[in-house]
Image (cartoon, rainbow, N blue to C red):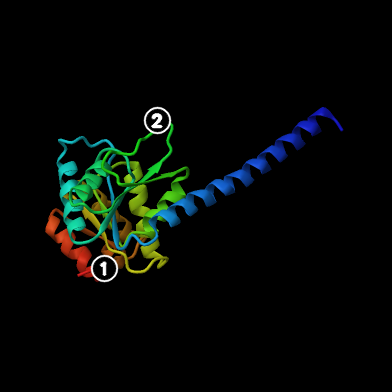
Amino acid sequence: MMIKDIQKEFLENRNKNKDVWRIFRVVSDFTDAFEDLDGIGPAVSIFGSARSDKNDFYYQKAVEIANRLSKEGYAIITGGGPGIMEAANKGAKMANNVSIGLNIELPHEQEINQYVTLPLNFKYFFTRKVTFMKYAVSFVVMPGGFGTMDELFESLVLKQTNKIGYFPIVLFGEEFWKPLIEFMKNLKDVGYVGENDLNLFKVTDDIEEVVSYIKSETGFI
């Protein structure tokens, strides 16, 4: 066998071994999450920018929203990091309710914020997103960047394609979301999304409306 053939076989076997171990890591992500979150009761996942500081308007609103939802009996789930995630965990902890952080291993080493009372660490984004969806009865989406948009559109696609049951999604911050809503309307106008697709979410600036909407839509009254 030529040296090039030996090298090729070695590389192929090494990649196969990597894939096998990757499967075990995926299973480990799911197993840990399913064991730790079993029985937490109704929960709301809150998304938003990791870059918002404590003086940011939406940081303060996230604290209030999480606190109000916690007092209504909902556990709060976030990505476990800083910014809006920290704010939501803070609001939950202030209400002495379950404050969950689904942390993701990143090159810049995101750390679990101090307000998380039930931390979980994930290696993969997709296992983390499955957990967000599996253990929440609703999403509240605060202003944010690419990660926030990823989580928002993932949930919208699942609702649009009926891959999940009825699942209320709230976008908080009318001014921030206005350009995106206009873009979605343009998608509707050219036929890329349906008329009813624009009803897959609710946009509001009112914290009490967020709480009452989630309670009524989830039947948790």
Residue 156 x, y percent position in the rendering: 35, 59
**Amino acid type, label 1:** Thr
Q: Residue furthest top?
A: 3
Where residue 44 appears, as percent x and y from the top left, is 28, 57
Looking at the image, is 111 positioned above or below residue 28? above
Specify whether 20 is left or right of 178: right
Q: What residue does disc 1 label?
A: 218
Q: Is residue 193 above or below residue 124?
A: below
Q: Give the amino acid type for the residue marked by disc 2 in the picture.
A: His
**Residue for point 67% across, 43% down:** 16
- x and y percent of residue 111 in the render? 35, 35
Q: Which residue is mark 2?
A: 108
How packed mark 2 is, by other alpha carbons closer than 10 Å (few <14, some 14-19, many 20 or more), is few
Q: Nearer the viewer, residue 167 or 127?
A: 127
In 3D space, how far apart are the residues under numbered discs 1 and 2 (Cα atoms)? 37 Å
* Pointer 1 local density, CA inside 10 Å: few below 14, some 14–19, many at least 20: some
Q: From the image, which quarter does the C terminus lie in?
A: bottom left
First in residue order: circle 1 vs circle 2 = 2
Circles 1, 2 touching at the beta carbon (< 8 Å)? no
Q: Residue at x 29, y 44 (%)?
A: 116
Question: Residue 1 appears at what percent x and percent y?
Answer: 87, 33
Q: Quadrant of residue 197?
A: bottom left
Q: Quadrant of residue 210?
A: bottom left
Circle 2 — which element?
A: loop
